[in-house]
Image (cartoon, rainbow, N blue to C red):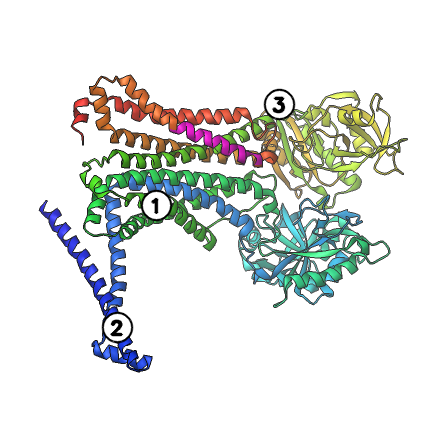
């Protein structure tokens, strides 16, 4: 007690000394102003009046400056004192500190992890010089241009039906590059293409980007070793050269500078390596790692399907290039759009067969390209946005949980706060002290969140990269945007959970607070106000959990519905792998003999019951379509059919039922017979009430008798599980890229080494890739739904635990505050069952309110999920009911434990409790 009294005396003296210093400064300021006014009345100038007043007061300005210095020093001292005091308070309550920091780390860390992926895919600036000057060109017109081919897998992944596109013809690129004065550089790229690369005698598949000679100079990409591709290299007569990526250099050449000048055989054509791009540059599409850059002029020799003048001739009508430019300094985007629009209109409307007419009003739009062309942004923008909303809800729940903890802690410190107020401390000063403690918690939680996010984002990026249908390379790490985001979220979280407890904790009735017992039990009215605020935070928590639970239920039901879809074939015990012999120079009869030899060797492998091939794997997201003209029929406009090219024994291997006729056999395959199979959907649409066997069709009106229908097969999912079966035509496979399918009698993965040996015996330079089972292929096709379901389940489980802990804490605190009341009730005859039900009833009342508000919130949010769902509606009654029941069950558990503890209170001990 003596130490407490001495401490209180010192504290009171400190408050009185500071008040005295403040009053002294105010008094000196008042006297100075009075003397200045007297001197002005005597006719002195303002400067003279102030000088004489300072002399008369004996240097009051010096006194004021000293007071001002004292205030600044005092503020720093007070801040340091607050920090020391806050650290002592947090160290004194390690349970509260640990729980708060862990809760913050989980809530903020989850947000930072998702933001890291968003930053890598959408926000990160390209690692090139002055990336802010880069723009990508898009065209707009009233009508779609008349082109022979249009590539749509770039910055505008799905432009069909739109008047905006991103692909240009080679002549348009040449004209835009040479006839403009607003861009300091213009480049063209055809995006990624897969090819066969032989480096140091090792054959493998690689992804190359066809680029113009101005690619590296326009982007200003530094070289790790060697030189970039230049304009002199982008010529049909120039020696073939290639630039490789840093990752390819390290993987194939172990990072040795001697790689420069070595030969790299691409699709049978030798190229000379002239440079290695900078370490962090992987192309214009972040996430799609490019291994090689090949001059655009070499595309006819590298890719046989692009020979001749079809793609890069001055009269080419193929729109396949994406164009990126760099604005000249001082040139606005608006001016550049206008100037480039004139050039493009001239290029698009010129020639004997113009792609557009002047009346179509062709023009140019410029979009920011500082972050790349954004294909992954198109693929993942909506799922990542939904995940960001989910982790945002988790953070709000965490903040509500911590707010309840801090309210309970502030109640326990009411005597301390009341004593400080009684000794002269101002309310703002106390709020600053409490917010300093909040700042310490936020700082520790933010640091822990960064460490958690660094691990979580790496795991998530790896999961996305390995689970997606195509090759992805998403790199994450700590940069200034991630750190700034974490700091901003931490500050917001501190404001959310710290401000209300600080304001409420310093709003005290001194008489009631000083009269409160050691347990901190307040008077009835004051305690009721605190209880209402805590209950409000708890309702907020529970209401935010319901949408997460409902969303998880919707995605799980979507996956269940997709997995229950009958694909029309048996996906079990099927092994798949891809080869691309066309890239190695195989074509015509030589290609068919290669396929036939491979099928015979694969059939001979023990454990393989049958083998076939197709031009693409089933349920892989790849789709070929055509316009089918039926012989003898000119009416009807719905001619679009899906087209799949298959090998012999396709129906047997895939176990697709043959409904009528025969299958495509080895003779059809080897002799190039123009025969076809159709599915039941096509028979119903194009041959209702007829026998289609023997009928003929073609891809043009003039060649409507090219293919003869020899069989009808069952309906099969060819593109995606979620799409309805379309009319489909099966033709003999003759293209230079194939997927082999092997039906096995044992585990398909056990046959992978034997398959590789069999292919190597036919051609050791023929690489195979994408080796997986058909079931694995289907799982990959459901990757996006699985990603959403898994992460939503994780976030919903975390949110549910936080909400239940919060509810448990509120009810436990309420029981502790009502110990005296419960003792009186039990002393007056209340039984344990009545006490148990009374406490549970209070918890369920709060939980029921939260669940009701959560259902209303869910009805407003789940409608944005419609495009990601399958076989279930956004307002699915089962999902809503299960989420509400799960929330109420968890709330019941969180209420039962403290209620059971309340029934064990000894009435005699409770009556003596203050």
Say left or right for 214 vs 801: right
> Which residue is more in the foreground, 411 or 475?
411
Query: Does 849 appear in magenta?
Result: yes
Query: Mark 3 and mark 2: span between their CA atoms?
Result: 106 Å
- Is disc 2 placed on a helix, strand or loop? helix
- The reply to whether dot 2 and dot 1 touch (C-beta < 8 Å) is no
Most distant residue in the left direction: 2
- The reply to whether dot 3 and dot 1 touch (C-beta < 8 Å) is no
Q: Which region is colored magenta?
A: 846-863
Q: How many marks?
A: 3
> Which residue is more in the foreground, 131 or 828?
828
Q: Which label's residue is closer to the chain start, 3 or 1? A: 1
Q: Which label's residue is closer to the chain start, 2 or 1? A: 2
Query: Does 430 appear in magenta?
Result: no
Q: Which label's residue is closer to the chain start, 3 or 2? A: 2
| Residue 251: percent from left, percent from top | 55, 50
Query: Mark 3 and mark 1: span between their CA atoms?
Result: 64 Å
């Amino acid at each position: 007690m003596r130490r407490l009294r001495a401490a209180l005396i010192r504290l009171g003296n400190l408050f009185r000394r500071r008040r005295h210093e403040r009053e002294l400064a105010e008094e000196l300021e008042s006297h100075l102003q009075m003397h200045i006014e007297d001197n002005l009345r005597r006719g002195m100038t303002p400067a003279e009046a102030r000088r004489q007043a300072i002399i008369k007061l004996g240097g009051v300005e010096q006194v004021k400056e000293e007071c001002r210095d004292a205030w600044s020093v005092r503020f720093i001292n007070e801040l340091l004192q607050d920090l020391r005091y806050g650290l002592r308070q947090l160290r004194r309550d390690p349970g509260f500190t640990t729980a708060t920091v862990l809760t913050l780390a989980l809530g903020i860390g989850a947000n930072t992890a998702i933001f890291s992926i968003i930053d890598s895919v959408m926000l990160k600036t390209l690692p090139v010089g002055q990336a802010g000057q880069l723009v990508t060109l898009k065209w707009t017109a009233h009508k779609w241009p008349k082109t022979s081919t249009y590539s749509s897998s770039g910055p505008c992944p799905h432009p069909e039906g739109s008047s905006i596109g991103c692909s240009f013809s080679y002549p348009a690129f040449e004209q835009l590059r040479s006839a403009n004065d607003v861009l300091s550089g213009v480049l063209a790229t055809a995006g990624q293409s897969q090819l066969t690369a032989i480096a140091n005698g090792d054959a493998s598949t690689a992804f190359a980007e066809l680029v113009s000679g101005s690619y590296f100079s326009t982007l200003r990409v530094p070289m790790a070793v060697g030189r970039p591709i230049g304009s002199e290299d982008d010529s049909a007569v120039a020696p073939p050269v290639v630039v490789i990526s840093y990752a390819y250099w390290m993987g194939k050449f172990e990072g040795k500078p001697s790689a420069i000048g070595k030969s790299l055989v691409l699709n049978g054509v030798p190229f000379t390596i002239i440079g290695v791009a900078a370490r962090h540059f992987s192309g214009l599409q972040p996430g799609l790692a490019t291994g090689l850059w090949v001059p655009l002029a070499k595309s006819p020799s590298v890719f046989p399907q692009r020979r001749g003048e079809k793609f890069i001739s001055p009269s080419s009508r193929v729109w396949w290039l994406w164009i990126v430019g760099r604005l000249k300094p001082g040139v606005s985007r608006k001016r550049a759009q206008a100037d480039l629009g004139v050039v493009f209109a001239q290029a698009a409307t010129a020639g004997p067969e113009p792609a557009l007419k002047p009346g179509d009003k062709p023009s140019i739009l410029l979009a920011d390209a500082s972050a790349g062309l954004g294909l992954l942004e198109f693929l993942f923008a909506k799922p990542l946005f939904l995940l960001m909303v989910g982790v945002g809800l988790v953070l709000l729940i965490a903040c509500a949980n911590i707010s309840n903890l801090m309210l309970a802690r502030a109640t326990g410190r009411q005597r301390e706060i009341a004593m400080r107020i009684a000794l002269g401390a101002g309310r703002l000063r106390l709020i600053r002290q409490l917010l300093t403690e909040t700042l310490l918690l936020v700082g520790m939680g933010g640091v822990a969140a960064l460490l958690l996010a660094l691990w979580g984002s790496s795991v998530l990026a790896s999961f996305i990269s390995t689970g997606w249908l195509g090759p992805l390379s998403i790199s994450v790490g700590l940069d200034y945007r991630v750190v700034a985001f974490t700091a901003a979220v931490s500050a917001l979280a501190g404001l959310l959970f710290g401000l209300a407890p600080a304001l409420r904790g310093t709003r005290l009735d001194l008489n009631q607070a000083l009269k409160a017992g050691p347990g901190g039990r307040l008077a009835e009215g004051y305690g009721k106000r605190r209880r209402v605020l805590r209950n409000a935070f708890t309702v907020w928590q529970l209401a935010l959990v319901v949408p997460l639970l409902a969303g998880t239920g919707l995605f799980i039901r979507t996956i269940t519905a997709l997995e229950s879809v009958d694909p029309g074939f048996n996906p079990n015990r099927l092994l798949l792998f891809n080869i691309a012999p066309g890239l190695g120079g195989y074509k015509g009869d030589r290609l068919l003999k290669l396929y036939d030899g491979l099928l015979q060797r694969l059939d001979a492998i023990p454990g393989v019951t049958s083998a076939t091939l197709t031009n693409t794997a089933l349920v892989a997201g790849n789709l070929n379509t055509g316009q089918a003209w039926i012989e003898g029929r000119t009416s009807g406009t719905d001619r679009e059919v899906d087209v799949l090219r298959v090998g012999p024994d396709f129906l047997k291997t895939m176990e697709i039922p043959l409904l009528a006729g025969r299958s495509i056999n080895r003779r059809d395959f080897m002799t190039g017979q123009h025969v076809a199979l159709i599915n039941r959907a096509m028979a119903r649409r194009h041959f209702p009430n007829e026998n289609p066997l023997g009928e003929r069709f073609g891809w043009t009106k003039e060649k409507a008798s090219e293919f003869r229908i020899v069989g009808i097969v069952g309906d099969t999912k060819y593109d995606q599980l979620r799409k309805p079966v379309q009319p489909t035509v099966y033709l003999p496979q003759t293209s230079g890229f194939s997927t082999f399918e092997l039906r096995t009698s044992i585990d398909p993965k056990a046959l992978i080494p034997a398959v590789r040996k069999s292919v190597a015996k036919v051609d050791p330079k023929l690489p195979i890739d994408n080796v997986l089972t058909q079931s694995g292929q289907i799982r990959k096709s459901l990757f996006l739904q699985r990603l959403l379901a898994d992460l939503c389940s994780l976030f919903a489980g975390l949110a549910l635990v936080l909400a239940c802990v919060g509810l448990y804490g509120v009810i436990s605190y309420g029981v502790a505050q009502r110990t005296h009341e419960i003792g009186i009730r039990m002393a007056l005859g209340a039984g344990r069952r009545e006490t148990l039900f009374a406490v549970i009833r209070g918890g369920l009342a709060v939980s029921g309110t939260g669940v009701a508000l959560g259902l209303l919130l869910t009805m407003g949010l789940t409608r944005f999920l419609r495009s990601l769902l399958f076989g279930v509606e956004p307002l699915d009654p089962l999902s809503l009911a299960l989420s509400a029941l799960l929330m109420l069950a968890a709330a019941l558990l969180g209420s039962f434990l403290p209620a059971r503890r309340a029934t064990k209170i000894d009435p005699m001990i409770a009556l003596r409790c203050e």
